[in-house]
């Protein structure tokens, strides 16, 4: 069953990893080896989760990269479906 409105993976990471560990964005970015700005954008849902960032979370916090990337894909699909009516494409019928 498809989720209608799955959470952004960054928001999930913030609520389920960063906050429970009582980490600041600065400290978490140092642990992950990324810039504070890049992590902040992700955690606030303003940037997509890249495969590299998912791998960093896997290595640092034990979350499976595959799971995190599936969350990103589910989120992206849900966002695209919300604007599907704006995409004007006619169904192609092959002439046989």
Image: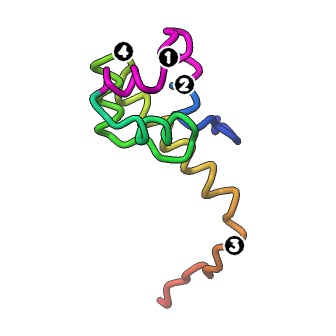
Q: Position of residue 91 (x, y in %)?
A: 60, 78
Badge number at residue 37: none
C-alpha distance separating marks 3 and 4: 39 Å
Q: Which mark is residue 14?
A: 2
Q: CA distance from mark 2 to mark 3?
A: 32 Å
Q: Residues within 10 Å of mark 4 (few under 14, many from 20)?
A: few
| Farthest-out residue, top | 21
Label 2 vs 4, first from the N-terminus: 2
Residue 70 lies in quadrant? top left
Query: Which residue position is annotated with label 3?
Result: 86
The image shows residue 55 at horizontal and vertical percentages of 29, 30
Point 32% across, 40% down: residue: 51
Helix, strand or loop status at disc 3: helix
84 and 96: which is toward the camera = 84
Horizontal relation, residue 87 to residue 37: left or right: right
Marks 3 and 1, Cα distance to the nearest angstrom?
Answer: 36 Å
Q: Is residue 77 above or below residue 36?
A: below
Asked whether disc 3 touches disc 1, contact meaning CB atoms under 8 Å apart, the reply is no
Q: Which residue is mark 4?
A: 61
Tell me the residue at 35%/32% (across/down). Answer: 54
Residues shaded magenta:
14-32
x and y percent of residue 81 in the render?
A: 65, 56
Name the image quarter holding residue 30. Answer: top left
Asked if marks 1 and 2 touch (Cβ < 8 Å), the reply is yes
Q: CA distance from mark 2 to mark 4?
A: 12 Å
Left or right: 50 with respect to 8? left
Q: Label 4 vs label 1: CA separation?
A: 8 Å
Badge 2 or badge 3: first in the primary sequence = 2
Q: Mark 2 or mark 3, which is nearer to you?
A: 2
Q: Please report contact status of discs 4 and 1: CB closer than 8 Å, yes or no.
A: yes
Which numbered disc, 3 or 1, marks the residue that appears first in the sequence?
A: 1
Q: Residue 17 shows which numbered tag?
A: 1
């Amino acid at each position: 069953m498809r989720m209608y409105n799955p959470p952004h993976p960054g928001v999930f990471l913030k609520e389920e990893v960063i906050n429970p560990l009582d980490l600041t964005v600065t400290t978490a970015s140092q642990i992950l080896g990324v810039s504070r700005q890049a992590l902040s954008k992700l955690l606030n849902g303003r940037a997509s989760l890249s495969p590299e960032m998912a791998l960093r979370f896997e290595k640092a916090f034990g979350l499976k990269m595959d799971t995190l990337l599936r969350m990103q894909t589910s989120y992206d699909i849900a966002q695209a479906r919300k604007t599907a009516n704006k995409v004007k494409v006619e169904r192609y019928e092959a002439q046989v």
